[in-house]
Amino acid sequence: MEDQVRRYLEKAAAGGDGDDKLPPKLFESLVMSGLRLDLVERGRIVCSMNVPPRLLNAGNFLHGGATATLVDVVGSAVMFTVGAPLTGVSVEINVSYLDAAFLNEEVEIEAKVLRVGKAVGVSSVEFRKKSSGKIIAQGRHTKYLAVPSKM
């Protein structure tokens, strides 16, 4: 599989046509596998995960790209808890990285709805070390919630 990923990335970097043999949504499944949903309530979701080896960066701690992906996906999912019919598309994602999470360390991910209007939704996502409560990262996600056409 590593060879397939390498070929795919090299082909994409060279402007290839993207015709590959990898499963669809590989990136999401790579990051999301092992995520546990611990709590769902109106306007709030709490998840947890142990940091797996596949999500480590060169410094041997949770990769920033994986963190940003989790802000995207978990920050989108929390929109459903307040009645949003769909999650729309990302307008802006920002992440502040405040500390590191290491291999097998348990991380708690809490997403909260800040606002869901007719066209825009905003969520915050906070990552904490489950053992100490120390904040690892804070993210904010703004979504355009596709408004149905009146045509």
Image (cartoon, grey):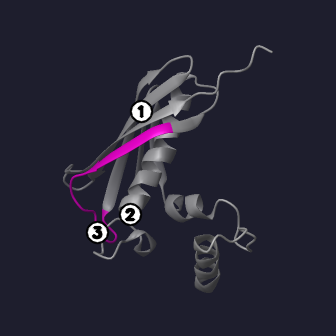
Whichever of callouts 3 and 1 sits on the residue coming sooner in the sequence is 3
Which residue corresponds to mark 3?
102
Q: Secondary structure at mark 2?
A: strand
Q: Percent position (x, y) of residue 130?
A: 27, 53
Report the number of discs: 3
Residue lying farthest right?
151
Whichever of callouts 3 and 2 sits on the residue coming sooner in the sequence is 2
Which residue corresponds to mark 2?
50
Look at 41% across and 60% down and name the residue there: 65
Q: Which residue type does callout 3 highlight?
A: Phe
Q: Residues within 10 Å of mark 2 (few under 14, many from 20)?
A: some
Closer to us: 137 or 82 = 137
Which residue corresponds to mark 1?
123
Q: Percent position (x, y) of residue 86?
A: 63, 31
Look at 21% across and 53% down and name the residue there: 98
Q: Secondary structure at mark 1?
A: strand
Look at 21% across and 57% down and name the residue there: 99
